[in-house]
Image (tube, rainbow, N blue to C red):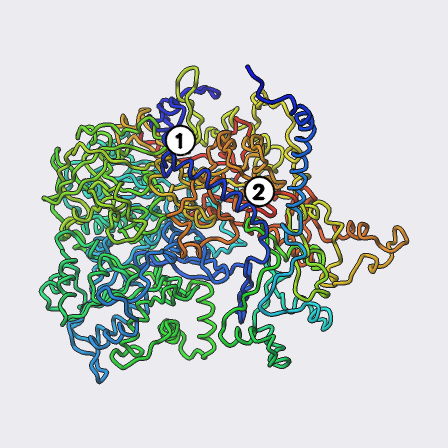
Amino acid sequence: MPQIFPKALNPIAKMLVLGLPLLAATTGVTGAAFYRSSYATGVGETPSQPVAFSHAHHVGQLGIHCAYCHTTVEKSGFANIPPTKTCMNCHQQIWQGADMLAPVRESYKHDKPIEWNRVHNLPHYAYFNHSIHVAKGVGCVTCHGQLDQQNLTMQSSTLLMEWCIACHRTPEKHLRPQDKIFDMKWDAAQHGTNPKTGKPYTQLELGLELKEKHRVRDAVTLTNCSMCHR
Amino acid sequence: MKPDSTDTSETFPVAPPALLGAGQDEFPEGASEFADEPSRRRFLTLMSASIALATGAGCNLRPASQRKILPYTTQPDEVTPGVPTYYASAAPFAGYGQGVLVRSNEGRPTKIEGNPTHPGSLGGAGLHALASVLDLYDPDRARGVTNRGVATNYELAVAALRKALVEESGQPKNIKLRILTETVTSPTLAGQITALLAAVPNARWTQFEAISSTNAREGITRAFGKPLNVVYDFNKADVVVSLDADFLGTGPGHVRYSRDFADRRKLRHDGKDAAQIAAGREAATREKPFKEGVKADLADTLVNRLYAVETMPTNTGAVADHRLAVTSGEVETFARVLAQKLGVAGVLAAGALSAGAQTWFAAQPNMPDGPLVADLKAEARKGKVIVVAGDHLAPSLHALVMAINDKLGSFGQTVKLIESVEATAAGKMIDLKTLTGELAAKTADALLILGGANPAHTAPADVDFAAALDAFSRDNTKFSLFLGSHQDETGVLCQWLVNEAHYLETWGDIRAYDGTASIQQPLIAPLHGGKSAIELLATVMKSAEPGVPAAPRDPQEIVRETWKKWYEAKNKGATAGAFERFWQTSVRAGVIAGSAPAAATATLVATWSSGAAASPPVPGPDALEVNFRACPSLFDGRFANNGWLQELPKPLTKISWDNAAYMSPATAAKLQLPKTNFKWTGGEHGRAEVSVVELDVNGKKVKAPVWVLPGHADGAVTVHLGHGRARAGTYAATTPDEPNTEGQPYRGFNAYPLRTSAAPWSATAKVTKTGKLYFLACTQGHWSMVEKDPVSGKMMDRKPVRRGTLADYKKNPMFAKLPPMATGETEAINDNMPQPKGYKEHHAHDARLHPLNMYAPAEGLAPGMREFQQRRWAMALDLSACTGCSACVVACQSENNIPIVGKKEVTRGREMYWINIDRYYEGPANDVLALTDPNAVKAYFQPRMCVQCENAPCEIVCPVGATVHSTDGLNDMTYNRCVGTRYCSNNCPYKVRRFNFLTFQGNDWNTDTIKLGRNPDVSVRSRGVMEKCTFCVQRIRYAEIVAERELALGTRKEPDPAKGEVLIKDGEILTACQSACPSGAIVFGDINDPTAAVSRWKNEPSNYGLLAELNTRPRLTHMAVVRNPNPAMK
């Protein structure tokens, strides 16, 4: 029987012995990296919006409280996008002729909602609830980033399941006092001195105390599938 | 039988014998086929295309900025996006209302629940009320106004109506106006019609119900001289005799009756005693539910007893302690004999009783008139007996039953009379036959059909309403207008069709079985711009005065006006604000306080027996009687386009998507019909090949498939009405390749052509074999827990339903805990639950029989779980209370977005129900067809859903971890992880996992309107995913989030586990099945809470774990059926 491959291919075959696993591994790593990349997750992305609403201006400069617009964040799973009426509360008086606000006035006049582009898209099978996170001491900034510095709103987190789970396993890394939920600039050191160490609080020390205080449940319970998937 | 025996009980067959064939074939039918049966070439094309598409779809990794989010422009005050709101209303059913609470998610009604404050509901809800939300989203609803089939608008219809009815001057024309409605109990609508009738002297009103209670009303009129409604209090009845009355399964009061009846069947160590029962029900709320059941120690005197005499087995008969199968011709004879023996004066002569019935009256020592009479006559029973007759029975029988109740002293105690709830207009009523004659002769001038009455389909065969209406409508000098939800059989024959608003879309009012009125409030603007009858009539009336030109009026205003008048008449001199408060309270509560009519006082007139036949006709030995009854799910056909109700396996018969001619095994043998052929699937996949017979009633012929039903009276056939509708819509139609027995492309056959106005309920028929065969989908054999012992070849009896009599219970209250079967869950209960009050200790089991376990229990599952697990969700289900009504199945379907799959898929065993209600027969033979004595057949029901095993067999076989245990004891199913291996289903001993084989499109996946009705809190599953009961995990998590939130914010008190306190109170979470159950047979809660109902129920001695011998430790346990047969009767 004649040889199928000429002898000259031997070095290539030897290289393939090493090369194929390497290729497979590279593909895997590339795939995983791509899956987590900002391109795939959309982290850092700033979708265009029908009205160029700036959180930096309204929150950062004017100091409007988050819950003035997002009224349901403390009582519902869904933190509502404010109705047009909320915009008009102020914009009937100020900037009432601005071109930029034309879509808002149109919406109010014709009773047609403004079609915003969703920034944070969770899959339909994941049921995230704002109210419980806020009640247990997760601040807005933890997931949404420094909104007081963003002009158009940006997706600040990957929203991958590993990102959710990381916090559900160790919530203490992110907990803050209930009165600091909406504070964009808070950090644990502002909480004062830890009587146990005599030094300013670290996030971990404070987080563990708050976990106890806010009755945050254990990591096993918090990572049950049906916590988020129903 | 030995406790550990796997032999089949000779008296307790667990499955149809056809199942014996199951397991012989490796692959089930259909396993090797694709649903759309592509060719090889097409298969390859599809595969390569799907690979290409999968690659393409996989590239779509950037979901961000691709979805829109739309806020309100002005947010309504009461809406918090993400938090559902509940509104009280009342679901209409054949004119009567049942109080409901409707859940609204962002303005879309998505789920119906019972209204705990409504006397007709007490928190439970009937099948039809629960399914009514789907009717709202019915894709085949009429979507606009049509004039002779041409689309037009409402304003033109109103103009035409006004032109026909009202002079230019505004005065009503004195024309021969005819109004056709169904039963009307709405005070507002009745007021409008009465006013219209008064203003138009020649106007007449026809009320037509195909399933009418005319006979009952006529009988009561004979007995008391006036038409009254009868209301029963089953909670106070010690003995109930049902004469072909399915009071637990149908009728406007059946939900309340089920609850009252079941309360006297539940044995509880902390139940009610005689004094508490006599005191009646106190008002209950969600937080403070009723005290339930009767005290187990006093069971002897407090457990009720039901004797059922009936033709076709019903749910009521199935739960009866004694059941007698007689032809419907014999019921009156039975009643007369009973009345004579009870000493009722003036009873006419009775005919001869059949042999079975004679045993009920056979003399015994100390009981000269037989055990039944002795039971009813006993001094202790005085005023605690109810004799109830089916609405379809003859008027003379109803009068007789009133006389019996009178003799037994039931009036004022267990049987109450109230003024008639149904609205009529004296001297202005004509029947359908007269109306049809007038239409045919064109002596009437205008016809208004309101509220979707559909006599073109449902009228008796001798009344050709359709032809008369057609001729009438073709005459341009006449006027006909139909207000209904569909372009149905009647609607298309009218000149004008105005699309009707659903009850969830408009204002209205309606009365319940006991006369309590409710306001119906809209939850959504009419989807297709529909109008209500109230709104339509208002266009020709101003206030109560017809004729004055009226601008369109808000129906709310019209309903308010009715109640304002009522309120002001009742509360003279009330301030304006008082009415407003009353109105708000009434709308909010869903019940108008004080609107129930007071008990009427009436005495039996001496001539009650006049008009009765001297002796009821006795059918000849060869005559076969055919009975016409409402379908338990489609009723008279009005629900024919409701997919949930079409697919629902009918209670008891378990037939889905079809009706059949039901007959007993003996009758079938007499007709020499071949045995039902399940093919080689042995019934497991529900595809039953049955023979077709031709029913011939006086020359009218209908072909019907035969379903042999043990327990059916010999010499009779029962057919269900409501199927075979030509114009109901998509769900009532089939593809031409699966026609019905008549060869038409409709679901089921239409039995109305056999029915005449002279014999609307039963007739003598000739039944002939056609030799043809037909496929029925019957789900009883699906996911059967029965299996063949590989060694002996016998069927293994797992004893899924444990049952006993009260005597058995007294002898050994723990009779249901068969060692070793009970040990798995008993061990857990003993270790983790407090002792019930009054019991010194748990029943000790033989520890040697504890199942062997190589491994230590998983962490958190070990005895003493309370420290590990904050909450432990569990359920208990009392089989004594279950009537098999299937309300839970529909509630579950509605709550959990469960698709319907169609008949073809049902016959492949692919239906998606998370709850199955199994029906088990008990009788002297193992073979269903050999159960030739219908009186010896007993039936039991067992709802079966995922039992949330603590040692779950499904979890250990899932290769991807899609089903895992949660710390609170739930067997979580994660759809997005599931890859569809189906290993879990193979390993599930309970067979409660359902695989979504196809996307089941064509049913409701792509239907735009149905998308609106889905529950947003539950994932809509696509194909390739396993699913199962989750204990309504979305409701658990919702309540948990509320409680945990309040705890974190300090607005809820920290519970002290040492005191047995829990964070989430009992009753804060109701699963869909639990809240729907009319008889309150299901409780759900946290077994860490010793005071929770679920803990108390599980502590009852009759509690047992289904297949607990497998050491699965089911969190859902069942309670054994305890029946209370008369010891003097065999």
Q: Is residue B65 left or right of residue B234?
A: right
Verify CB contact (< 8 Å) between mark 1 and mark 2. no
Q: Is residue B319 visible?
A: no
| Picture residue at 63% right of the left edge, 65% below the top | A70
Q: Residue B184 — which label?
A: none
Which residue type carries mark 1? Ala
Q: Is residue B978 left or right of residue B562?
A: right
The C terminus of chain B sits in image quarter: top left
Local secondary structure at mark 1: loop
B150 above or below B775? below
Which residue type carries mark 2? Trp
Is label 1 on the same chain as label 2?
yes
Q: Quadrant of residue B780?
A: top left
Local secondary structure at mark 2: strand
Query: Is label 1 or label 2 in front?
Result: 1
Pick out the residue farthest to the bottom: B169
**Mark 1 — on which chain does it sit?**
B
In front of the other: B345 or A86: A86
Residue B113, position in %: x, y? 45, 54
Tell me how far mark 1 sits from mark 2, CA to CA: 37 Å
Q: Residue B873 — which label?
A: 2
Mark 1 Cα-neighbour bin, 10 Å: few <14, some 14–19, many ≥20: few
Q: Is residue B244 left or right of residue A148?
A: left
Residue B1007, position in %: x, y? 39, 53
A129 above or below B1073? below
B269 above or below A21? below
Q: Quadrant of residue B228?
A: bottom left
B968 above or below B782? below
Q: Is residue B812 visible?
A: yes
In front of the other: B544 or B19: B19
Q: Which residue is mark 1?
A: B31
**Mark 2 — on which chain does it sit?**
B
